[in-house]
Image (spheres, rainbow, N blue to C red):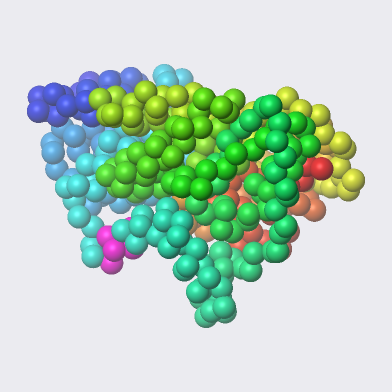
Amino acid sequence: MRTELPATFLATEDGRRANAILRSCVHCGFCNATCPTYQVTGDELDGPRGRIYLMKSMFESGEISGVVREHLDRCLTCRSCETTCPSGVRYSELLEIGRSRIEKDAPRPLAKSLMRKLLGAVLPAKGLLTVLLRLGRPLRPLFPRKFRHYLAPVSAHAPQPRTQHARKVLLLNGCVQRQLTPQVNDHLVALLNARGVTVIEVADEACCGGLNLHLGQDDAAHASMTRNIKALTPYLGEVEAIISTASGCGVTLKDYGRLYPAEGPLAAQAQAIAAKTVDAVELLAHFEFKPAVQARRIAVQTPCTLQHGQKLNGRMEVLLERCGYDLLPVAEPHLCCGSAGTYSILEPEISDQLRTRKLAALHKHQPEVIATANIGCQMHLAAGTSTPVLHWLTLLE
Ligand code: SF4
Ligand code: SF4
């Protein structure tokens, strides 16, 4: 694709990256075939190729129209287009640059702007989130139906005693998962302890920064990353890996080497953290598991952050099959479920349509359980079905 970006923009790191990415697109349109928002609306501007054109014209003209903002806001950042693209276009990096520009230079209407600021401030703040969930749970019936699932009482769990071994890993707590489904990490600790691995958890771990990044809130994202790098770095020498059980957090940490400024004071530490981060599916692939006592029929939903972001498609399925579960075929596995971080709150219409489509595919062969690997997808899907939606880790014996 030919570009004519202004010299002032090309003089910046963002400008050079945007130019290179734009020029790598040959506008073939293959990506539209696997883009969830294009599948829902049928509008070229809701597909990756159309969004790339919109960003090109925004960068070239310096003008940010409401149309550009609307169609970029509607993107799920699912990265299905990157998996499909034959030219290796790094769409999500271009989108980061585009969203950051919009956030700085094109303020939204007040109500939308406040909602985005609120979500960007509350969800990554563990202490605040804990307090709000505690206050909100007793008032659950008063909330709109779509939010009630997030306020469900957390089932009582007894954390396993931690045992000490020569092998050590650091387990990320995550912001939202720890509040809503603490049993997932406790279960992983028990599995690893039983296999001779000590699990270290860091009390002052911060949010990975991914949520703010997707909202175009660069300063908040970098502040979270900096806090997290400072909290995790002291443990890097003693652990063989940093484990993420929420694929949405893992995909961001694995990208710290690119996301954290190369000239920043913690650049080397950011690279080291990225290099050590693995998803639980990667670590557990090296261990044996007993066959499940109750081998159920399972439909698997692989989160976009696991299949398109971390390129670990099929790994969860292999582990579950090794445990004797009967995995059912699911159509359109590449399509997003519509959760996508804060997307289900900010773009509810498309999000609901995608969930309905995803649940129809998951339900087709009457599974007893739906398995997933990310807290956002788990909550979003569970709000639309009576079939239990569980984190895949909790299905391992
Ligand atoms: S598939 Fe790749 S090269 Fe083709 S239009 Fe989409 S982003 Fe551009
Ligand atoms: S990230 Fe997902 S929603 Fe956005 S353009 Fe790519 S495929 Fe479409």
Residue at 31% x, 47% y is 220
Point out the image quarter for the C terminus: top right
Residue at 51% x, 32% y is 235
Q: Horizontal and vertical percent for residue 132?
A: 47, 68
Q: How many marks?
A: 0
Q: Is residue 72 left or right of residue 84?
A: left
Looking at the image, residue 395 lies above or below residue 20: below
Q: Is residue 362 left or right of residue 22?
A: right
Q: Horizontal and vertical percent for residue 291?
A: 87, 37
Q: Is residue 70 left or right of residue 256?
A: left
Q: Which residues are magenta?
A: 111-116
Is residue 304 in sight in this rendering? no
Prevailing SS of the magenta stretch: helix
Asked whether 355 falls inside the magenta stretch, the response is no
Looking at the image, residue 86 lies above or below residue 97: above
Q: Is residue 50 left or right of residue 390?
A: left
Point out the image quarter for the N terminus: top left
Is residue 108 in sight in this rendering? yes
Asked whether 112 falls inside the magenta stretch, the response is yes
Q: Horizontal and vertical percent for residue 232?
A: 47, 36
> Within the image, what quadrant is residue 162 found in?
top right
Looking at the image, residue 139 lies above or below residue 349: below
Q: Horizontal and vertical percent for residue 362?
A: 69, 49
Residue at 63% x, 56% y is 181
Relative depth, front residue between 210 and 74: 210
Relative depth, front residue between 138 and 71: 138
